Amino acid sequence: MSSQGIETSLSPDDFQELKGVIKEFLSKYRYLYEFRVQKLVFYAEVYAIDNYERRLTDASWKPYIYGSFSEDVRVAVRDLDVPTQTVYRNGDETIKYLNKGLSGQHLESNAKREIINRVHGRTRNQSTQELAQFSKSHWLFEHTDYESVMSFERYLNYIQDIDEGDRSLFDSDHPEIRDDSLVQINNEV
């Protein structure tokens, strides 16, 4: 898969699922910038692991200067079939991805929708900079060399050895998940 010259190694089904996750987030806002989408999806990944020991997507992540970054998410955002608006922020041109008629229900998985709803509730009042700082201070970021792929397997092994309450995004009232649509992590590291 590619969009605007950027490649992703996700299968076509996983790529469509990632786009659905992004659209589900976008349906909760009037608009989003890619930078915030990156931070929301990363937060949701950590939330899923901390509470279900599974991932939300198969997107690959790396630590970069502004926090956790995924080329897969970048490609998926740029490939969305939603209205956009080019704007200038801090002197730079950027794209606003607009919610024009998105009402949710972009995922077949109720489990993923419930996780996104919970993550939205926890993050809607946080600034994008706060979400970026969360990603920069997270175990995955701190235990991965700059521009190297983050190991969710290593993180799963780490959290399995600590109390649930000590996990960064453990939610004692997390939604009960009844389907098996979350991504299994191969934790044989």
Image: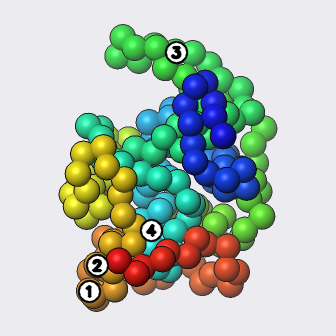
> Closer to the N terminus: mark 3 or mark 4?
4
Residue in the foreground of this view, choosing between 37 and 76: 76
Mark 3 belongs to which amino acid? Answer: Val
Q: Please name the amino acid that badge 4 sits on.
A: Tyr
Judged from the image, the secondary structure of the residue bearing numbered disc 1 is loop
Task: In the rendered view, tell whether residue 8 sits above or below residue 119.
Answer: above
Label 4 environment density (alpha carbons within 10 Å; few <14, some 14–19, many ≥20)? many
Which residue carries the number 2 mark? 158
Q: Can residue 118 be seen in this view?
A: no
Give the residue at x 26% y 86%: 162
**In the figure, is residue 119 to the left or right of 143?**
right
Residue type (three-letter) at the residue carrying disc 2: Tyr
The numbered mark, 2 or 4, whose residue comes first in the sequence reads 4
In whole angstroms, how far apart are the C-alphas of marks 3 and 2?
42 Å
Structural distance between the alpha carbons of marks 1 and 2 = 7 Å
- Label at residue 87: 3
Q: Distance between the residues labelled 3 and 4?
A: 31 Å
Q: Do the residues labelled 4 and 1 touch (CB within 8 Å)?
A: no
Residue drawn at (77%, 64%), measured in percent from left and top? Answer: 108
The crowd level at tag 1 (other Cα within 10 Å; few <14, some 14-19, many 20+) is few
The residue under label 1 is: 162
- Mark in front: 3 vs 2: 2
For image coordinates 60% across by 84% down, the residue present is 176
Q: How crowded is mark 2: few (under 14 residues within 10 Å), some or many (20 or more)?
A: few
